[in-house]
Amino acid sequence: KMASSSSLVLSSPSLTPVIKDGEYKNWAELPSELTSSILQRLSLVEILENAQKVCTSWRRVCKDPSMWRKIVMHNLGNLWYDREIMCRHVVDRSQGGLIEIEIWYFCTDSLLNYIADSSSSLRSLTLALCSQITNNGLTEALMKLPLLEELDVSFSTLSGDSLRVVGQSCPNLKTFKLNCLGDIRTANEGDDDALAIAETMPGLHNLQIFGNKLTDAGLNAIIDHCLNLEHLDLRQCFNVNIVGDLEKRCSERVKVLRRPNDSTHDYPYEEVLVFNTMRASEDGFMPNVSCYHDFEGASDNSDYDPYDVYDDPYDMWESLWLLISELDLSSSEFPEYNAFVGFVDRFLEKSCLHELKLKILKRKNNKPCVMRWVDFVARRKLIKHVDVEYIYVSRKRLEVMPVSLYVCETLLYLRLNRVFVGSLDSVSLPYLKTMRLDENMYDSDTGIESLISSCPALEDLSIVRKLDDNPLISDYFKVEPFPQFCNLSSLEAEVCLRHLDILGMLPTFLESFPNLKSIVLVDLTHSKTDMLPIALSSVPPQCLLSSLEFVEIKSRYEAEFVLMELANYFAENSVILKKLVVRWKRSKLEEDTVLWDLLSLPWRS
């Protein structure tokens, strides 16, 4: 039974004809409702610059007011024309039927009031990073939109008094977002925003105030007055301490609560802010701060500027690090190793990382640093993904991983490549799902089995070992009883298949993985070895009887006894096996014989 592959090439039809009932029909003859549904999937610029110029019928559809119930002006690229003029044009096309509009960066008081005057039925308004809008301009416009249900004015300079006007002018408001940069300095506190929201927006269902400076008192006011609140996002609000009675009240009143230290991976403004303000220079890896100038003087009438707490732009840069949940860094990207160490040291002081990935090229005299970095993120109990890899490093310079890493209960993914694993006397990784161990050193012969057996939720395991580590693998086989990994579905192991203990005890080893679906075995033997036949157990492990679907066996040498014996074992005992792959260094003399032997395998599935 051999797996075969074929390629299928699909070609897209011409834009002019469409086939229906064996006859060609013109795209222009499609019903206008269907054409409108298709064209609404295009961006605003694509509609105005391309689609409406295709034909008369498409232009008619593009000018229909129903096409402009929703307007999104975001990621428009480097347009040569005026965005504000374009926005007014499409608002006019809606003919008062505009329901939802989203504008990033360029909205002004004049444009906002033009929209409000033309669209009294507006239900949803997003003004993201629109620094030119003043308090007076925003409140004047919102007084004309009594039906508004969703409002996002993130990174605006709204004062507490202006927020009260917003709440009083929009009595139907159900979703409100007022986000800014988080500030870890507890001295910078204020409940003006929270009190204004509590007093004037009792009908809120969703509230996002990312990075707000409210305290426990402000949060209590919101909980007391916004009785319909279902979703509350308090990420980066470091002045609130959600414990005790306050935590109980939040859990009773709010269905979904995002806490101050929760991950920011789904925060809609994270990438935008990082892109605009984290332009690291080649020589110092510090930000280009010229982009802050756009925010200066955004509102002459505001009594609160979210950036006035910073003495200089570099303070803002450090606070922005709080928004970053993932760090993927290679030491080779820096002019020298010390610059790499200094950058990571400064970064970790301010960050709330959930994912740390480091690739390190370490020279003889480079000082150790990775152990303290990993220890720092592990002790904070926020980290979910750790990936540490050393490149071309001798075993003498390997760094020891900290004990705290092996008791980090938040960890979901762990990859260690060419490190000294260290002491494993105490291991508890209850939620770890993926573990990859590549060419590491272990403190004792029982280290690897201790590490693996302490991960009850493990689903994906990969082990790459040096040839002289095989005795450690065989020691694992001697552990009784075998630890069980009921969640593990994929396994890849690189070992010496020609080692008698490894091969002979493979069925016993597989008993540890009753739900295994995929296994890859890579033979690392350095030289061709003649072996006597080995009798594999006649009682197949549970995974072969119920779950194993894919087997791959690789060898750098000819397809001699070992590979054929293993292939025969899996084919003969696997009940639902779908694919068996055998890779070897083929020779012309043996190729036909091996292929015939593979075709003749007694498949049970």
Image (cartoon, grey):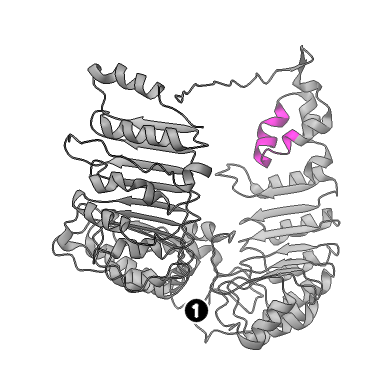
Q: Residue at x 64, y 46 (%)?
A: 82
Classify residue 519 as left or right of residue 476.
right
Q: x, y (%) of residue 134?
A: 67, 68
* Near-viewer residue (197 or 106): 197
Residue 547 visible in the shown view:
no
Q: Residues within 10 Å of mark 1 (few under 14, many from 20)?
A: some
Q: x, y (%) of residue 596?
A: 36, 19
Classify residue 527 as left or right of residue 257.
left
| Amino acid of disc 1 | Ile
- Residue lying furthest top: 23
Residue of label 1 = 184
Classify residue 169 as left or right of residue 583.
right
Residue 33, quarter of picture: top right
Q: x, y (%) of residue 372?
A: 30, 72
Q: Which residues are magenta?
A: 38-53
Per the image, is 42 magenta? yes
Q: x, y (%) of residue 595?
A: 35, 20
Per the image, is 152 magenta? no
Residue 600, quarter of picture: top left
